[in-house]
Image (cartoon, rainbow, N blue to C red):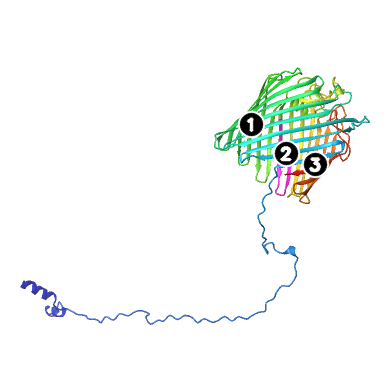
Amino acid sequence: MKQNIALAAFLLMPAGLAAQTQAADTALNRTVVVEQEYAPRIQDAAKVNVLPRVEEPDVTPREVEYDAATAPLAQMPTDTLQTFAANEPLRQATRGYARAGYGNYNNLDIRADYRFRLSARDRLGLTFALDGMDGRLNPGDGAEKWNTFRYHTRAALDYTHRFRRIDLDAAARFGLRHFGLLPGSAASKQKFTSGDVHIGAASTTSEWPVQFRAETNLLLYQRLYSPGFHNAQEVGVRTRADVWGAVGHNQTVGIDLQMDNRLYRRNGFDNYTALSLTPYYAYKADGWTLRVGMHIDPSMGFGKKFRMSPDLLAQYTFPARTTLYVQARSGRLLNDFRRLEALSPYTEPAAQLDATYEQVNAALGIRVGTLSGLGLHLYGGYQDLKDDLCLLSPASSAAPFPAWMVWDTHNIYAGLGLSYSYRDLVSLTGEGIYRHWSASDKGEQAGALALKPAFEGNVKLEVRPLSPLHAYVGYRHIARTSVGGQAIDPVSNLYLGASYDLVSGLGAYAKIDNLLNKHYWHTWLCPTEGLNFVVGLTFRF
């Protein structure tokens, strides 16, 4: 215990006392003790931060000068005064439309149409139309005037239902054409009656790997007073389907199918079935549209048994609203009673006619459109028709009436189309096409090309200077092919018309045809009317 106390006392001993106990200095060893006062100094402690003196700016007031010169309102910047306008709702189309007009030559122009919206998915439409004339026509060349009539009546009912992925449509149509024949003919009048029943379906979703469109039609037709075909009847069934599916990015493959069955009564014609199969490949991307296909057209019964032709299209659209295309189209056209009526109701087939087959219709063209409303279409090509329909005059056939015959024909054509529109005020359209025809098997000497068009041109100008006023003027010209150095008088029709909305839903219209009072034939035994007009009223409801 005593030892611990002694050790603690030694450790707590002051340093000076400890130094005194050190050994005395010698010649070799000397202890030096240095003591210095601690007085820390802070650098720059005496500096004082002083802000520079701020001098007030010296402002000299000036007199304000105003520009009092006047300026026309047209030079005012467009953003000087912001305009305020409410959102104008789009004008809803009316469900019903009707018009009724009457003119010289007892011309009638009657049409009515109404669309029912049964539900959000159901639509029902009704259509009725009647047009015609009854008067004395001038066939020209000093011949006696021909007292005749012609009326055409149509009625239709169509229904559409939209399922979630499929659209279903059905329709029933009726047609009646009643007209007088050339005086002294075996029959003084003629009547054609037609009736159609249609049902179809089409897919509307992109979720399915395969898309389709399909339809079937029952076609009934009767010619009542045809010489040699009295009360002749034609029954047709037309079935069509198009099935396609994607096989890659922007690529599809598909096949078009069509089958036509024709059954005849009271005319001695043979029944037949015509098939058409068109497999194809299509590509569309980066401005390109390509389609490569082939028509394979067999038939059973009457007519040629087998035909083949190309179905090609190559089209490229440049960014500058310009489209360049090359195409080779073809296919079969049945020469049934319906097509004969559409081409010329005043004629009869000399015998049962084979189908016209377009072996090839090859064309090269360019379409140009601009933002200013100007459009241009320039094209040219070659057409080869097998068993083409050719209409012979009574003077060149054994029958006392114009008769249809078939010849192989060819034509080289070139066409130009122009269009221009400025807002909803002015619209100008025009098109002209020139054709050079030739026929095989001495068809040219037989007059087969007499009614073939050598040049077709049409120009039309429409203006709407006021909102309720719409007016138009146009000219149509068809020059016929020369046969033996002679040609039938061309079609030359200068026409104009106008319509004006009197009050909401009620308007008036007028149209005038053949302002130049020309005498020409649309087809054999079908002379045109002289200057003729129709005036009437229109109703929207």
SS at badge 3: strand
User: Taking the image as drawn, is residue 377 in sight?
Assistant: yes
**Disc marking residue 493:** none
Give how far across and how far down residue 281 sits, in percent.
60, 32
Question: Could you give the CA–CA distance between mark 1 and mark 3, rounded to whole angstroms?
Answer: 37 Å
Task: Give whichever of discs 2 and 1 has the lower sequence position.
Answer: 2
Give how far across and how far down residue 534 sits, in percent.
83, 40
Question: Could you give the CA–CA distance between mark 2 and mark 1, rounded to whole angstroms?
Answer: 22 Å
Mark 2 crowd level (few <14, some 14–19, many ≥20, 10 Å Cα): some
Residue highlighted by disc 2: 113
* Residue type at the position of mark 2: Asp
Residue 374 is one of the magenta-drawn residues? yes
* Residue type at the position of mark 1: Gly
Instruction: Give the quadrant of the C terminus.
Output: top right
Residue 353 is one of the magenta-drawn residues? no
Q: Is residue 116 above or below residue 16?
A: above
Q: Picture quarter containing residue 16?
A: bottom left
Camera-side mark, 2 or 1: 2
Give how far across and how far down residue 200 sits, in percent.
63, 31
Q: Nearer the viewer, residue 168 or 356?
A: 168
Q: Is residue 117 above or below residue 197?
A: below
Camera-side mark, 3 or 2: 2
**Disc marking residue 459:** 3
Task: Give whichever of discs 1 and 3 has the lower sequence position.
Answer: 1
Q: Nearer the viewer, residue 221 or 504?
A: 504
Give the residue drawn at x 11%, y 76%: 9
* Residue type at the position of mark 3: Val
Residue highlighted by disc 1: 200
Q: How many marks?
A: 3
What is the span of residues highlighted in magenta in the rendered image? 361-377
